[in-house]
Image (cartoon, helix red, strand yellow):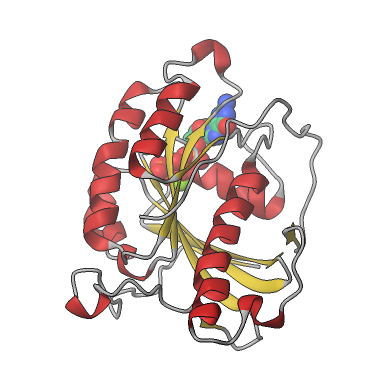
Amino acid sequence: MASSQTPIDPNSSTNNNSSSQQQQQPRPLQMGAKGAYIVRLLMVGDSSCGKTSLVLRFDQNVFSTKFVTTIGVDYRDKMVKIEGAPMRLQLWDTAGQERFRSLTSNFFGRADGFVLCYDISNRPSFDHVIGWMRDIKTRAPPDCDIVLCGNKSDLDSDRVVQVEEGRGLADEYGVQFFETSALTGFHVEEMFTSLATTIKRRRIDEYEESQGAGGGGGMAGGMASVSGVSQTISLGKGEGAPAGATRSCC
Ligand SMILES: Nc1nc2c(ncn2[C@@H]2O[C@H](COP(=O)(O)OP(=O)(O)OP(=O)(O)O)[C@@H](O)[C@H]2O)c(=O)[nH]1
Ligand SMILES: [Mg+2]
């Protein structure tokens, strides 16, 4: 697990505007030095919707009510095992503030997946999802996967964005949808695991099948699991029914 406030220069990225990426075939996932697939996930969305809090809940199982706005891009990584496949999730936690937009959008070109967040108690953050999605479509690889994430589901009494609106917008874009709470932990692990599983199936299993190597590359099937060091504090896991997940992909 690693954390840094200094972003690695992403400008060596490939971009979906290049004609070489117009093909239908998804790219294979890159294999890292330690035999784990590298999955680059970007956290995007308006400032204060809870991107950093979601990453910290997922990575370390902690939560703070203190708001420390992200400057530029923060980075963490987390090892997980998805259906038998070891994957290093690189979590790029971008700043939501407008003044960092040109910096953070430079990172889009190398993403494998996006967690596009809004705050269910903040209508503008939901309205801005369209703009975020436009940026992703413009700058990110066409085979990346996206999850739309309505965070702060614990603030139900302050809710201004209904679950159906979030799910409806996700359906329009054909992406996965979750409501989460970084505060309670509700659906946080499920959301990251679901995104990683979608990426794994398309970028490992389907790719290998298309190459005639057989599905899964010999990896054991089964439930996705998450491993790694986690620090537990006494905040209960969330309860309630899933907000639902729909199809993926951009
Ligand atoms: N009630 C509640 N508060 C949350 C939740 N997630 C985050 N917060 C609070 O919302 C504030 C902003 O959270 P951050 O995670 O820093 O927001 P961010 O999206 O990373 O913001 P930027 O870094 O500026 O883009 C903090 O005070 C958090 O404690 C949640 O699920 N429920
Ligand atoms: Mg942040």
Q: Nearer the viewer, residue 37 or 10?
A: 37
- Toward which corner of the image does residue 214 lie, by quadrant? bottom right
Classify 187 as above or below 160: below
Residue 187, image x and y in percent?
65, 38
Q: Quadrant of the N terminus?
A: bottom right
Residue 77, image x and y in percent?
59, 66
Classify 41 as above or below 45: below
Count how many numbered circles sit on residues in the image. Answer: 0
Q: Nearer the viewer, residue 236 or 249?
A: 249
Residue drawn 76% across and 34% down? Answer: 237
Residue drawn 40% across and 62% down? Answer: 144
Q: Nearer the viewer, residue 77 or 32?
A: 32
Residue 38, image x and y in percent?
54, 75
Residue drawn 52% across and 33% down? Answer: 151
Residue 57, image x and y in percent?
65, 45
Residue drawn 66% across and 55% down? Answer: 59
Classify 184 as above or below 248: above
Q: Quadrant of the C terminus?
A: bottom left
- Left or right, 13 with respect to 249, comes to left
- Left or right, 204 with respect to 168, comes to right
Residue 187 visible in the current orientation: yes
- Left or right, 108 with respect to 170, comes to left
Residue 69 visible in the current orientation: no
